């Protein structure tokens, strides 16, 4: 076998064997196959796709390029949740402690912002002192003691994915269903979990804008999980407006704490409860009704908030933020975004909203950029809301006045108003369960 032959085979649409896929992945991870050859191979995959067998082989090879956590000494079912990425998606922040408070262990390895989407790690790090670079022993200790631990991908966990992802990012080869599926699943399966709940986003703020593509990605990931003996459930959820009202880092922590205290926007609550229900079903074997009742109890009686507080403390963060949100980083200016017309909000350009948040400093434009934890957007009007001329649609939380004003002006253009109120659509689009 040589890389040239395999690139040519994929270019011409031939299915590669597991051994051939493994040869490419380990060669690239080990440095014997150069970037330019792997880039050519990845582009061939973008055009030709991969069979289910090839995709599973790819995920497996990527997973085996590093360590696979063995959590068998941590008692109880270990279930994780992963989202394919959205705008204002702070679900992991509240869901992980909520589900842990219900008795399921949640070992969560999260990512940073990617493109226009936010990242759980950046949000957690807005809490002063919070550490996401846990050593495996610390991760295990938190998981054992609190039932929840949240950390970033280390060099040890699926290193082939890390290297391949960086290459895909600069060679226009991110948007490929088998490549996305194998990338996500290689990391998740290396966590040593028993089951996984995936939130596949669809809509104008998602990587998979079309529901048919979201469904295909969902089925591909379920297939990989099945090939590795793991139970995977997918919810396809709508990402055609920011989830909740806050977009940014500290602001999303503010919204999370408020939500855990009981003040939760309806769409955020619906997504968190639906995903939580699936996690309890996989982890505890409860019925849907029992799962909902347990989640509601842990949310209402304060045990989920308490678990969040304990997690912040255990990971080095300032737990006082839970009682005093003003201890989180604060932006210097709040610039209102005023409506230029009247009517019902019919469309929100969520991709553009995400990109504006990145430009403001809530995400990275280049790999080496640092995020500004304090900046962000706070939405006052969302899909279906009635708006009068001059009403405040949103606020821009900025640290520099002029860019803040510019972004506020552009944010107003992200709204399309109409005379008719749009039909209300359920945020949960579809459930697809593996067997
Ligand atoms: N998230 C990942 O981890 N990988 C992808 O390829 C896309 C989204």
Image: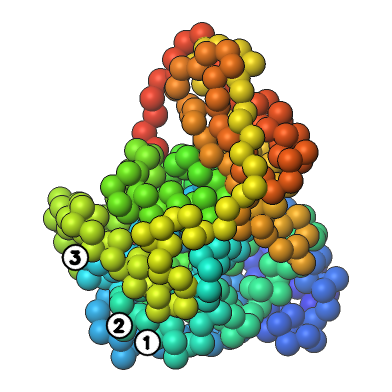
Q: Residue at x 30, y 61 (%)?
A: 305
Under circle 2, the secondary element is helix
Q: Is mark 2 within 8 Å of ligand 1?
A: no
Q: Crowding near pointer 2: few (<14 within 10 Å), some, many (20+)? A: some
Q: Residues at badges 1 and 2 in contact (C-beta under 8 Å)?
A: yes
Position of 58 relative to 369 (above/below): below
Q: Residue furthest right?
A: 36
Going by the image, does 203 lie left or right of 435? right
Q: Nearer the viewer, residue 400 or 116?
A: 400
Reading the image, the residue beneath label 1 is 141
Going by the image, does 252 lie left or right of 403? left
Quarter holding residue 277: bottom left
Nearest-to-viewer mark from 2 and 3: 2
Reading the image, the residue beneath label 3 is 285
Residue 411 visible in the picture: yes
Q: Residues at badges 1 and 3 in contact (C-beta under 8 Å)?
A: no
Quarter holding residue 310: bottom left
Q: Crowding near pointer 1: few (<14 within 10 Å), some, many (20+)? A: some
Under circle 1, the secondary element is helix
Measured as percent of width and height from the top left, residue 333 is found at 65, 42
Position of 293 relative to 387 (above/below): below
């Amino acid at each position: 076998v040589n890389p040239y032959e395999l690139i040519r085979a994929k270019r011409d649409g031939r299915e590669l064997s597991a051994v051939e896929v493994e040869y490419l992945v380990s060669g690239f991870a080990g440095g014997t196959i150069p970037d330019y050859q792997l880039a050519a191979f990845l582009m061939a995959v973008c055009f030709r796709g991969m069979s289910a067998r090839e995709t599973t082989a790819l995920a497996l090879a990527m997973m085996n390029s590093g360590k696979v956590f063995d959590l068998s000494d941590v008692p109880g079912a270990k279930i994780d949740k992963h989202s394919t990425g959205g705008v204002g998606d702070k679900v992991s922040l509240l869901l992980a402690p909520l589900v842990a408070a219900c008795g399921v262990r949640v070992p969560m390895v999260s990512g940073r912002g990617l493109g226009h989407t936010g990242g759980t790690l950046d949000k957690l790090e807005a809490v002063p002192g919070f550490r996401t670079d846990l050593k495996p022993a610390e991760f295990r200790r938190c998981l054992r003691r609190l039932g929840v631990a949240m950390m970033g991908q280390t060099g040890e966990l699926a290193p082939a994915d890390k290297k391949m992802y960086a290459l895909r990012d600069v060679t226009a080869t991110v948007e490929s269903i088998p490549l996305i599926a194998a990338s996500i699943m290689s990391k998740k399966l290396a966590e040593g979990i028993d089951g996984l709940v995936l939130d596949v986003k669809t809509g104008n703020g998602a990587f998979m804008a079309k529901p048919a593509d979201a469904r295909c990605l969902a089925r591909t990931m379920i297939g990989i999980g099945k090939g590795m003996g793991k139970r995977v459930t997918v919810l396809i959820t709508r990402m055609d407006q920011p989830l909740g009202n806050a977009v940014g880092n500290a602001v999303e922590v503010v919204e999370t704490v408020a939500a855990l205290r009981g003040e939760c926007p309806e769409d955020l609550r619906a997504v968190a409860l639906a995903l939580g229900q699936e996690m309890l079903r996989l982890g505890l074997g409860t019925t849907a009704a029992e799962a909902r009742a347990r989640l509601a109890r842990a949310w209402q009686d304060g045990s989920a908030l308490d678990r969040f507080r304990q997690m912040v403390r255990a990971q080095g963060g300032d737990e006082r933020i839970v009682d005093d949100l003003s201890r989180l980083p604060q932006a210097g200016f709040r610039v209102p975004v005023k409506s230029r017309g009247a009517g019902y909000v019919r469309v929100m350009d969520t991709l553009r909203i995400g990109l504006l948040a990145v430009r403001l400093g809530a995400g990275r434009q280049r790999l080496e950029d640092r995020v500004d934890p304090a900046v962000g957007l706070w939405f006052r009007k969302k899909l279906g809301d009635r708006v009068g001329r001059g009403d405040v649609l949103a606020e821009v939380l900025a640290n520099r006045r002029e860019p803040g004003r510019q972004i506020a002006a552009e944010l107003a253009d992200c709204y399309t108003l109409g005379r008719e109120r749009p039909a209300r659509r359920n945020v949960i689009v579809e459930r697809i369960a593996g067997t």
